[in-house]
Image (tube, grey):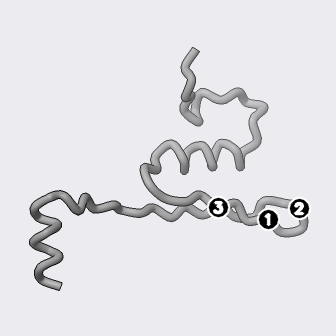
Amino acid sequence: MNPNPSPMDLPDSVPEWLRIVGEKVSSLRYGVVQIVVHDRKITQIERTEKTRLDPAREDSAIYRDHI
């Protein structure tokens, strides 16, 4: 059994919101997935992705020198 199933591998009994969260998380390297709730119901799912730069890379040092 796959320890990290894709959202498509989930059984039909899984709620739609959980499938959406799985899709958002599975394609995210760094970031945040937020679930917004109103009156005990999930109304919105937000994904914020961050891009991390490696400060040890030479081109990062060049960028830093031009700021």
Q: Which of marks 3 and 2 is nearer the N terminus?
A: 3
Distance from disc 2 to disc 1, alpha carbons, whole Å, reads 6 Å
Q: Which of 41 and 62 is in front in this view?
A: 62
Distance from disc 1 to disc 3, alpha carbons, whole Å, reads 10 Å
Q: Which of 36 and 59 is in front in this view?
A: 59
Above or below, 2 relative to 60:
above
Picture residue at 19% right of the left edge, 58% below the top: 56
Task: Please name the amino acid that badge 1 sits on.
Answer: Val
Splitting the image into 4 quarters, where does residue 19 fall? top right
Is 30 placed left or right of 41 in the picture? left
Quadrant where the C terminus sits is bottom left
Residue 8 position within the rendered picture, expressed as x and y whole percent measured from the top left? 58, 32
Picture residue at 34% right of the left edge, 61% below the top: 52
For mark 2, does the 10 Å Cα neighbourhood hold few (<14), some (14 to 19), or many (20 or more) residues? Answer: few
Residue 31 position within the rendered picture, expressed as x and y whole percent measured from the top left? 49, 59
Mark 2: secondary structure: loop
Is 34 placed left or right of 29 in the picture? right
Q: Which of 20 and 58 is in front in this view?
A: 58
Residue 57 position within the rendered picture, expressed as x and y whole percent measured from the top left? 15, 58
Kindly identify which residue carries mark 3. Answer: 34
Above or below, 52 relative to 17:
below
Splitting the image into 4 quarters, where does residue 34 fall? bottom right
Marks 1 and 2: in contact by CB < 8 Å?
yes
Task: Please name the amino acid that badge 2 sits on.
Answer: Arg
Task: Please name the amino acid that badge 3 sits on.
Answer: Gln
Kindly identify which residue carries mark 2. Answer: 40
Picture residue at 54% right of the left edge, 32% below the top: 6
Kindly identify which residue carries mark 1. Answer: 37
Q: Which residue lies furthest to the bottom in this view?
A: 67
